[in-house]
Image (spheres, rainbow, N blue to C red):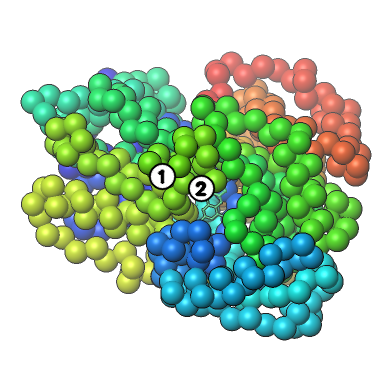
Amino acid sequence: MRRMQADVVVIGGGSTGAGVVRDAAMRGFSVVLVDRSDLAQGTTGRFHGLLHSGGRYVVSDPGSATECASENAILSRIQAPAIERTGGLFVAVPGDDPDYGDKFLAGAAATGVPASEISVAEALRREPRLNPGIFRAIQVEDGSVDGWQLTWGAVNSARAYGAQVLTYHPVTKIDVSDGAVRAVHCHDQRRDEEVIIDCSFVLNCAGPWAGQVTEMTGLPPVPVVPGRGIMIAMNHRLVNTVVNRLIYPADGDILVPVHTVSIIGTTDSMEADPDHLPIPQQEVQQMLDAGEHLIPGFRQARAVHAWAGSRPLIKDQRVATSDTRHMSRGMAVVDHLERDGVRGLLTIGGGKLTTYRLMAEHITDAMCEQLGEKRECRTASEEIPYETGAHHYVVTHRLADREADRLDDQIICECELLSRSMFTGLLEREPRATLDDLRRQLRLGMGPCQAGFCGTRAAGIAVTEKAVDAERASGLLRLFLKHRWIGLWPILYGDQVRQTALDHWIYSGTLDVEHLPAPVEEVVR
Ligand SMILES: Cc1cc2nc3c(=O)[nH]c(=O)nc-3n(C[C@H](O)[C@H](O)[C@H](O)COP(=O)(O)OP(=O)(O)OC[C@H]3O[C@@H](n4cnc5c(N)ncnc54)[C@H](O)[C@@H]3O)c2cc1C
């Protein structure tokens, strides 16, 4: 058993927890962030990739629209390398309500969301693949954001302010006595050891699992209603601008260009268990049909990966529990002193990745208020340093980097232009990482071949560099392929069947992956 001490424990290393640990550390608290798994592998690793302009909510949820607009501007300034400023279009396709555009423009003016109508000809000039039947187009300041880069940026900044970060440490219990929080118990999965962190404050940022975490205190769970949505990545950038339908928010109405792919989404339905999110066939077909409305011929592109995420929505009294589409996207802080008479515990839910910094500011303000301390939030004004420099992300950035080092560095993933030194450098810094942990930071196996070529190379290099032994490498590789498969089988049609068969032949035919020696130690998920 290991014992630690901190002022504050933040539970959950998604975008919200990352923002909170940074904010609390910058205000001078000693903070520990714990996550049951790797950073940003919950909802934050399973979202749509859109940095909202606010446009989506100007009619349906004006409060969220205003928050998104102002946070979009702040994040573009403080985390520029994680963001691609693609711009966005809301377009009306045949059959859409012709009057919605006027409501949209009025809503945008009222909520402070920058928006202006452009001619259909101009929209088609910018995005030639768009449905030629569109009859209105409004431009907004949507962007595309890398949730992993955003989260790691915030966490690294928190570390620089002295915060500690414990991944693969699921929280198992929270001690409460005499009406106040005393300690958090977690289990260090990699060392198989119990860890107790004595603290006077716990900030529960466990997203769709936040209800489960409050139960660990013995209190009734907060009513988090997981709203499941699926998304599909198509094998290239069909558009270079975020394209939205000019309608009241609905399923499959946004196409986001993210890195080398474009992502269509999403759906919204209540799911009881955020750990088991199905990707039903009929929703896959629904997304592909929705893509056709925006881009005729959409189905001819190859779907390369599908995934599902779960919105951490706090139950909204105005709508039925099952109706997650119409629940507010606004954030909510639950004060357990008010609700349950327990001091030192706050839970946050709702919100968006786009508003993660503001969510952090609200919950940290609420903590300071309960502690009776005045400490200013500085996260909006201080830029987060990135190794790559503070320029805006551009889709060609890796090409430019590879041109600079092409004579002395190998490419191990052609789809994502990942170089050997990028891979070995991160492995050296994180020797216990799984291939999935590395994927989230490097995009290993995330391009059109879905690890067909790079997976074996990565495992082989890890052994050659003596970072792991051969048995652990084969265990890591099999686990990696298993996880890739979860997102492949729902979209097995057309050319993707051929690609998957090729990948299978490579792994079975050249490596006999199923019969590699089993790892001596269990690989941590
Ligand atoms: C389908 C979909 C599409 C979306 N698209 C967008 C979009 O395009 N743009 C946008 O701005 N927002 C979008 N969102 C919303 C956004 O993704 C979420 O609001 C945001 O990622 C939530 O982050 P979080 O940190 O609160 O939760 P999470 O990322 O889920 O983090 C919670 C963390 O808690 C950890 N945890 C759980 N239990 C424990 C435990 N017992 N011990 C320790 N740790 C624990 C989990 O491992 C997890 O890492 C989308 C959401 C969904 C579902």
Position above or below: 128 against 256? below
Query: Quarter holding the C terminus?
Result: top right
Q: Earlier in the sequence, mark 2 or mark 1?
A: 1
Residue on which disc 2 sits: 326
Res 170 quadrant in image: top left
Label 2 to label 1, Cα distance in Å?
Answer: 9 Å
Between 377 and 317, the one lying in front of the other is 317
Between 476 and 139, the one lying in front of the other is 139
Q: Is residue 378 left or right of residue 508?
A: left
Residue 332 placed where, x, y %? 33, 48
Residue 389 placed where, x, y %? 50, 70
- Count of number-bearing discs: 2
Q: Is residue 459 left or right of residue 436?
A: right
Position above or below: 122 against 135? below
**Residue name at image x 82 percent, y 23 percent:** 512
Residue 450 placed where, x, y %? 75, 43
Asked if ligand 1 lies within 8 A of label 2, the reply is no
Query: Quarter holding the N terminus?
Result: top left
Position above or below: 13 against 352? above
- For residue 65, say whether it is visible: yes
Residue on which disc 1 sits: 318
Answer yes or no: do the residues labelled 2 and 1 have beta carbons within 8 Å?
A: yes
**Residue name at image x 60 percent, y 31 percent:** 277
Q: Residues within 10 Å of mark 2 (few under 14, many from 20)?
A: some
Q: Amino acid at mark 2?
A: His
Looking at the rendered structure, the secondary structure element under dot 2 is helix
Q: Amino acid at mark 1?
A: Arg
Which labelled disc corresponds to residue 20? none
Q: Residues within 10 Å of mark 1 (few under 14, many from 20)?
A: few
